[in-house]
Amino acid sequence: MIAGAGERAAGERAVDERAADKSAAGGRLRRTVGAAVGRRARLRWVHLVLGGALLMPYWMLSMVLLGALNPNQSPARQLLLYVLSLFTSLPMAAITALVPTVRGLEGAAARALCAAARPEELATGPARSWAARWRTALWYVLHVLFGGVVAGMTLTGTPVAVVLFLSFEGTDEFVRAWRRHFPDFLAAGPILGLGLLLLIVGTNAACGALLARWAPALLGPTPEERVAAAERRATVLAQRNRLARELHDSVGHALSAVGIQAAAAARVLRSNPDFAAEALEAIEETARAAVTELDTVLGLLREEDPEVAEPAGPTLAGLDDLLRQLGRAGVAVDADLAPGLAALPTAVSREAYRIVQEGLTNVLRHAGPAPAGLRVALADGRLDIELTSPLGTSRPSRPGGGRGLRGIAERAAVLCGGSTAGPGEDGTTWRLAVWLPVGGTT
């Protein structure tokens, strides 16, 4: 019984393997037929016929020039003239393809019809360097050459294949010529016709596949264009990061302060209405300042050239207002500010203000109404910022938070400076230290 069960299982596995083999063979057949006559093959045929049409002016000019050299030609020499005209027309095509706009036109045609592997990388504009022009010229020569071959085979070979396949009915002149030259192959007409059709289809598929493979290399960006595109992407990312930092530090600080002040006002609204009124006044002032800074940041988005637009915003000269706002929110800051901060370069002073603002906002978020120490020193061409506060345990981190310290590090890095943040040596305080070279912006 066990042996019988094993035999049945083996038989079922053999059946499954044969079914899998048939399915795989059917899949390969469908892929082969699709590659030969599917939608992609038909699009590539249109692309190649377009190349054949582009070849015609060059070919006809070559025919006129070569025919003028030897006007009296036999049929054999006439056939040789056709072949020579094809190859002498290619240099003329290459020369015209050096025009910069050809690259964009050929790139558009290849994206629409050639079904290349990476159509998004194909050229969309004119060639801006000689390297791009020569690559476009090579692509154009291949396009018109392969297109001329496929178009010629399609226009001349297809009627012949149909006549052969229909056994020459209604074509007495063709039959007589065929009998005279190929008497032994008269009965093989249908087979030869089918073979000729398969040859035309296969040539179209092969030429289309080759052009699709070569399109990214010849019509894609040059190394110089790739470097320029990477620089543009880096510039865009830098602009986005700068705007994100400005929004995070200005609006984020205002919202944190407003939240603390509103909570404090709600707690003492009945018991201490004077304090509640003062808190509401502080909320109004903070919100008005936030709207002003938001307009400033959004103004950067409207600049036609944001790369060179200089971000506006408060500087270290406005630290007194910032400390006063935080004092209303319950954060008493013991500030030790060096003299001469007003004379700092604008870029350094603005970034330093944002760093102090974000550091004090973190105190407000995580430690709550707690005292903080701020020291801003200026010596030996270096600006040092140190901020200390008690480690807060009552205010957990916000979901999605943690961008503030990263923004501080980015601001310092832009000015060729650095920053450190973490618990102090005593384990009860949090310390943020930032150093910036004065006048060393990049």
Image (cartoon, rainbow, N blue to C red):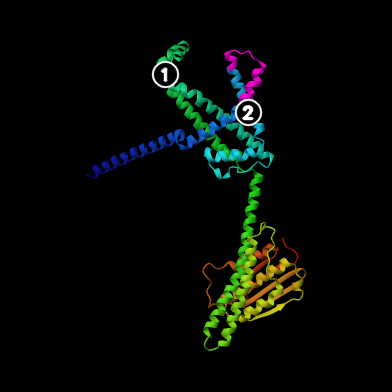
The residue depicted at 62 percent of the width and 68 percent of the height is 294
Kind of residue indicated by mark 2: Leu
Residue 248 pos. (x, y %) = 60, 67
Kind of residue indicated by mark 1: Gly
* Residue located beneath label 1 in the image: 189
In the image, residue 339 above or below residue 196? below
Is residue 371 at all visible to an observer of this figure?
no
Find residue 408 and name its label.
Answer: none
Upstream in sequence: badge 2 or badge 1 = 2
Q: Residue furthest top?
A: 180
Screen quadrant of the C terminus? bottom right
In the image, residue 278 above or below residue 397? below
Residue 66 inside the magenta-drawn segment? yes
Alpha carbon separation for disc pair 2 and 1: 35 Å
The residue depicted at 40 percent of the width and 18 percent of the height is 167
Residue 229 pos. (x, y %) = 63, 49
Residue 102 relative to residue 195: left or right: right
Other-residue count near label 1 (Cα within 10 Å), few / some / many at <14 / 14–19 / ≥20:
some
The residue depicted at 55 percent of the width and 82 percent of the height is 264
Q: What stretch is highlighted in magenta?
A: 59-78
Q: In which quarter of the image is residue 259?
A: bottom right
Find residue 90 and name its label.
Answer: 2
Residue 300 pos. (x, y %) = 65, 62
Q: How many labels does the image show?
A: 2
Residue 177 inside the magenta-drawn segment? no
Is residue 36 at all visible to an observer of this figure?
yes
Magenta segment, prevailing SS (helix, strand or loop): helix
Labelled pair 2, 1 in contact (Cβ < 8 Å)? no
